[in-house]
Image: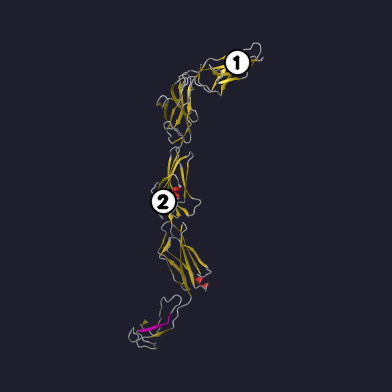
Amino acid sequence: MLHNDQHGIRVSWSAHEPESNVDGFFVAIGTTDSRESVLRFTEFGTESTAYINNIFFELSNRPDSALTTLFVISVKAINSAGLVSEIGESKHIFVQKANVPGIVFDGNKLYEDVSFTNDHTSVSASFYGFESEACNIISYDWAIGTTEYGTDVMTYTEYGLVMNNNSHGQAQIHLELYEDVKYFVSVRAATGCAGQYIVSCSDGIILDRKAPEVSFNIKPENDTTIISLGNVIYQAGSDSLNLIGNVSDRNGITETEWGLGTLPSLTDQLVYTSELTEITNVAQLVPGQSVFLTAHSTDQAGNINVSSSFAIVTDTTTPFINGLDCVKFVSIRKPVVTCSWDSLFENESRLASMTVSITNGGINQEQFVAHTVHASEYLFSFDMYDTIKENTNITYMSVTIIVTNIVGFSKTYGRNILVDRTPPTAQGLDVVTSTVPGEFADFHQKCQMPRRYVEVRLKGYNDTESGIDTSRLAFHCFTKLNIQINTL
């Protein structure tokens, strides 16, 4: 009798007791030389059949022995009087190797299993290891399902299956697959024993055509100012990169590398590395030059995503004003404070603000004007008439201009403007007309001979606050004369 289960056997027996009842059976398993070498006599109650497991049969024909080992099953019964029957034995049992299910690998890599694929047009598999010592294997076929050993996608067929040798084969067929669905490949080996198959199933493969998702964010905690404006990231300082990258995929990431370049997807600054900190912590950036952080990520299905951050620009300098000029003096008659400039420069990032304030200039400064100037403007003017009139003790005003860029670097400009409250003074006016034009007399004259011109000298004129800008003379006569005035 042939048996191919080395770890168990199903046994049936029977007994007849004409005088009393059978109270139990005892079963032993062993070789023809030692009937209890596998299992000593064990009570099985009054049942007449049992599957006996937790045992182990050596193969009858072992490679390390020229002898054939045959096994027997021994049964004895006991009746109600305690009498034990003679031992009954089974036929000799020849134990051979059990059928061995093979291993099925998903994917088009020969004898290498994969869990994900991005090919939605075909299913591939390979297999080996099917064995049947008792019946031999005569053919193979395969099926595809959405459950283990399922055939709802493709029933068993030999189509698309080829054998590379007696035990190794592979299969492929064109099918339309659907995203996130898990497909199982079953391989069935038909044995020479009618109706007996050895079936194995793969662990499944999932269609995944979506590439990993990559995002770039500003570090939540950093010691520099970093601003995202439009499609550009500006940061103060150039010795590090204050960005973090996040890569995610619903089926897992196999590899992510990071690089730095002067264009998206370019790595001419720092080549690809698996550690993002090797980029962000050691980057030496050129102020004002744009760089891009690039991630090259691959998921388990082989989908690749190459994504780059927004342009990153570093700033290490302040903005500045070129050609700033403000009025030097104001008075009740000329109360407008005006400042103008040729240009406003921010060479590395962008200008954030330009603010103007006007104060009284003293120790306890009182602010009269606070104003924000647009970057496109080139001057500002403020009428300070009411301020000058109401604050009679003010001798000068202070104008403060602060230009700030978006990363916080700023530069301050200050100008003092004198408040002039007194008119110019003069000691007197002498008429110094001579008979030769241009040769002025040395002293004041009450009358003169020339009738076509008058020559005068203004004595001791001065302005201690703002200085003399212009002087004007007026001449009045009682007759209609064409008179020229010459001054000294």
Would you say residue 199 sits in the magenta stretch?
no
Q: Is residue 397 rendered to the left or right of residue 49?
A: left
Question: Residue under circle 2?
Answer: 291
Magenta stretch secondary structure, dominant: strand
Sooner in the amino-acid sequence: mark 2 or mark 1: 1
In contact (CB < 8 Å): disc 2 and disc 1: no
Give the residue drawn at x 62%, y 15%. Answer: 77
Start-end of magenta stretch: 453-461
Disc 2 to disc 1, C-alpha distance: 89 Å
The numbered dot on residue 150 is none
Q: Is residue 139 visible?
A: yes
Image quarter (top left, top right, bottom left or bottom right) of the C terminus: bottom left
Q: Which mark is residue 76?
A: 1
The residue closer to the viewer here, 470 or 412, is 412
Residue kind at label 2, given as amino acid type: Val
Number of other residues with Cα within 10 Å of mark 2, as a class: few under 14, some 14 to 19, many 20 or more: many
